[in-house]
Image (cartoon, rainbow, N blue to C red):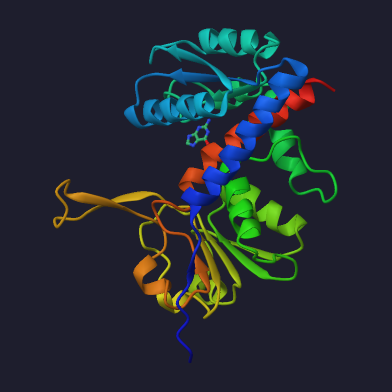
Amino acid sequence: MPVIMAQLIDGVTIAAQIRAEVKDQVAEMKRTLGITPGLATVLVGEDPASATYVRSKHKACEEAGIASFGHVLPKDATQEQVAAVLTELAANPNVHGILMQLPLPKHLNEDPLLALIPQHKDVDGFHPSNLGLLGVKGKPPPFAACTPAGCIELLERTGVSIAGKRAVVLGRSTIVGLPVSLMLLTRDATVTMCHSRTVNLASVVREADIIIAAIGKPLFVTADMVKPGAVVIDVGINRIADPSRKSGSRLVGDVDFDAVAPIASAITPVPGGVGPMTIAMLLKNTLKAAKQSQK
Ligand code: GUN
């Protein structure tokens, strides 16, 4: 069997290209229409990882020339207090996109709050109508969820054709597995979703031309599960113990990169693959929201 050394799908470079494209279009929008795209974020509580994500989203907005408005509520904020902020942002014409950072503190009920974000400001793509339309061919939703859209963008910008391919998605979450499956399906892939109840999972994954791993299990996809020449997109971000590192840990994906890279035809690294694409797609969606607000 020939040994194929996979092409590295460089999410850092591709995300930078998208961010530069958005920046140019934002500048043009300001020049021609006098409109500055605006993103509002809502962060409830003090979870350090969520606070870090939100900070990087604001920084990325600033670099692209997008206005950003941060709303931070205390960890014991009530459902009504969060709802009041979202309702105000929904009515604010300077806010084109609204993002409520998830997960919320446990005492809050996520779905009714997400429903307060109007579909035309749902730059995260979490609105049930936006999710549902992903599966309707020829009727794309105004916004696709950022991480799944980032996976598709990586495939397309790497020149991987999707139509007719066997795609296997590991994981059925509503923020990655389900939407990315629908996006592959409407691009004419033959899609199989695998999850915790799938029987003979390894043999199903072995049939894939395109593997999307989004199950949150470190190094789960091993070399024996991968057909030679498959394209592998790794959505996982897992921290595992590594005594050889000064920090005592390192980040790995859901794919055993070192073992799979010699077999695959193209593969994303972790970090530096799908991760940087999420923010790039958020900026792209915010620009789109501002453009659509003019129609
Ligand atoms: N938490 C983890 N990822 C995301 C994301 O893409 N959007 C929001 N709103 N919360 C998240």
- Relative to 69, residue 241 above or below: below
Residue 207 percent across, percent down from the top left: 59, 77
Kindly give the residue lying farthest to the front in the view shown. Answer: 31
- Relative to 263, residue 14 above or below: above
- Relative to 154, residue 281 above or below: above
Residue 31 percent across, percent down from the top left: 72, 20
- Asked whether residue 124 appears in the rendered view, the answer is no
Disc count in the image? 0
7 vs 178, left or right, is left
Would you identify the image quadrant in which residue 166 lies?
Answer: bottom right
- Asked whether residue 255 appears in the rendered view, the answer is yes
Write the residue at 42% across / 51% down.
272
Q: In which quarter of the image is the C terminus?
A: top right
Of residues 71 and 214, the one nearer the viewer is 71
Residue 102 percent across, percent down from the top left: 48, 30
Residue 241 percent across, percent down from the top left: 21, 53
Write the residue at 39% across / 49% down.
237
Kindly give the residue lying farthest to the bottom in the view shown. Answer: 1
47 vs 157, left or right, is left
87 vs 5, left or right, is right
Write the residue at 77% across / 55% down.
186
Would you identify the image quadrant in which residue 65 lies?
Answer: top right
Would you identify the image quadrant in which residue 67 lies?
Answer: top right
Write the residue at 53% across / 79% down.
227
